[in-house]
């Protein structure tokens, strides 16, 4: 019997924020995978090690969590005013599909450093010491992200003293600005890009589960916010308390599917199974003391509110960067569940508690003729190259 040989593809494994993924330059992919389609998806599935019914991704680069089952494809941008095109794929762990419906805000922090290291930024724009501005076109959602990448002696600075809860080692801070983060997808005649139903709070009816007050927002990533108390939760939960409860996970998925329909993202709840990356579902609560997953005691007076969010059907270990954008945007708009959980006062920044600790995110919002828009959301992340070289896959994988 003849077996296909392995081929090698240039790749870089990078951490960005509280996620990590395999980064590719578009030009380095096999020709069949340089455009969207079945070949590209099959290649990335094999690289990451999916689908894996064991849920471990042992035969691939994935880490068997939503935060580590990710792939990124980058290229110099042909779009005016931008430096790099950034395409993100959320790779399912146990199913054979790649979800291209949204961005990864955490990995966004690694895109600027990668572009500089790839020689895609003119040398004249890179200071000897200081920061280099990289304008990123986020191709999944058609939005601009501006990264301020620290530079020391003309090179990207990766190490430093910036601490990010959910990441054990400090690093250099990469400041991110998500411009005009509201997404058009799901917009209805009654709603807006930011609030697709036209309301800052809706009643979301989920047959067999209940009716819930919900803020449905398209900012960073489509997100469904609920009150923790309406779900029988406190907002202080860690992963084990949610992810070990299959009945609770099923309820969250039923709510997420109904919310996706109400937001106009899908037409039927059955479609939600093939759209696991979006929308996200999160629950909020007023500040309270709790112990983070690291063992650190988080005091109520350190935060403005508590937020827990699910990604790919499981409670996230920290907070997705795109969901943090949604949190910042919702906190800036009066009357949303996020705004109310944070005390209901006007603010342009919010610090929230998540399972790994705390995170601060800023937002600029304005109201015109009764419609709210968010012009930008700001947050600090960090990024680091973990490995660079080649990944290998069997030649008949795609």
Image (cartoon, rainbow, N blue to C red):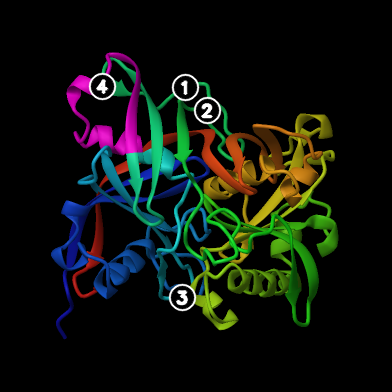
Residue toward you, 205 or 132: 205
Residue hosting label 1? 160
Q: Residues within 10 Å of mark 3 (few under 14, many from 20)?
A: some
Q: Residue at coordinates 59% horizontally, 43% vertically from top-left?
A: 368
Q: How many marks?
A: 4
Residue 137: horizontal and vertical position, in percent? 33, 46
> What is the spatial separation of the Cα atoms under label 1 and label 4, in whole angstroms?
19 Å
> What crowding class fits label 2: few (fewer than 14 Cα within 10 Å), some (14-19), or many (20 or more)?
some
Is 257 one of the magenta-colored residues? no
- Determine the CA span between mark 4 and mark 2: 24 Å
Seen in the picture, residue 330 relative to 146 is either above or below; the reply is below
Which mark sits nearer the N-terminus, 4 or 2? 4
Above or below, 42 against 367 in this view is below
Q: Earlier in the sequence, mark 4 or mark 3?
A: 3
Q: Is residue 36 rendered to the left or right of residue 277? A: left
Q: Which mark is residue 126?
A: 4
Q: Earlier in the sequence, mark 2 or mark 3?
A: 3
Residues at marks 2 and 1 touching, judged by CB atoms closer than 8 Å:
yes
Write down the quadrant of residue 256 in the picture.
bottom right
Q: CA distance from mark 3 to mark 1?
A: 38 Å
- Depth check, mark 1 against mark 4: the one in front is 4
Rendered image quadrant of residue 346: top right
Q: Nearer the viewer, residue 127 or 71?
A: 127
């Amino acid at each position: 019997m003849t077996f296909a040989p392995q081929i090698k593809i240039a790749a870089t494994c990078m951490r960005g924020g509280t996620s990590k993924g395999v980064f590719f330059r578009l030009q380095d992919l096999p020709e069949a995978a340089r455009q969207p389609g079945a070949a590209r998806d099959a290649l990335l599935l094999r690289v990451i090690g999916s689908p894996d019914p064991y849920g471990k991704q042992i035969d691939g680069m994935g880490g068997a969590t939503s935060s580590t089952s990710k792939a990124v494809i980058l290229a110099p941008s042909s779009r005016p005013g931008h430096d790099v095109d950034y395409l993100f794929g959320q790779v399912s762990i146990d199913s054979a599909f790649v979800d291209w419906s949204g961005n990864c805000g955490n990995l966004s922090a690694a895109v600027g450093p990668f572009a500089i290291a790839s020689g895609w930024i003119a040398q004249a724009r890179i200071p000897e010491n200081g920061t280099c501005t990289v304008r990123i076109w986020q191709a999944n959602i058609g939005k601009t992200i501006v990264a301020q990448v620290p530079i020391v002696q003309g090179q990207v600075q990766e190490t430093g003293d910036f601490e990010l809860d959910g990441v054990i080692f400090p690093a250099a801070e990469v400041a991110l600005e998500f411009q005009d983060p509201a997404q058009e997808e799901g917009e209805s005649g009654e709603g807006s890009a930011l609030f697709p139903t036209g309301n800052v709070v809706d009643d979301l009816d989920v047959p067999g589960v209940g009716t819930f007050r919900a803020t449905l927002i398209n900012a960073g990533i489509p997100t469904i916010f609920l009150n923790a108390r309406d779900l029988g939760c406190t907002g202080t939960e860690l992963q084990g308390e949610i992810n070990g409860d299959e009945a609770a996970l099923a309820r969250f998925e039923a709510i997420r599917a109904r919310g996706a329909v109400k937001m106009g993202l899908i037409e039927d709840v059955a479609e939600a199974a093939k759209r696991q990356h979006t929308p996200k579902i999160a629950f909020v609560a007023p500040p309270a003391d709790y112990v983070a997953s690291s063992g650190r005691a988080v005091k109520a007076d350190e935060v403005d509110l508590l937020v827990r969010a699910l990604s790919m059907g499981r409670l996230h270990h920290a907070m997705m960067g795109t969901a943090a954008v949604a949190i910042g945007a919702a906190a800036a708009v009066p009357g949303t569940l996020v705004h109310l959980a944070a005390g209901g006062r006007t603010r342009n920044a919010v610090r929230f508690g998540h399972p790994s600790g705390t995170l601060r995110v800023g937002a600029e919002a304005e109201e015109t003729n009764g419609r709210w828009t968010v012009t930008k959301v700001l947050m600090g992340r960090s990024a680091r190259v973990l490995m660079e070289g080649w990944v290998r896959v069997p030649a008949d994988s795609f």
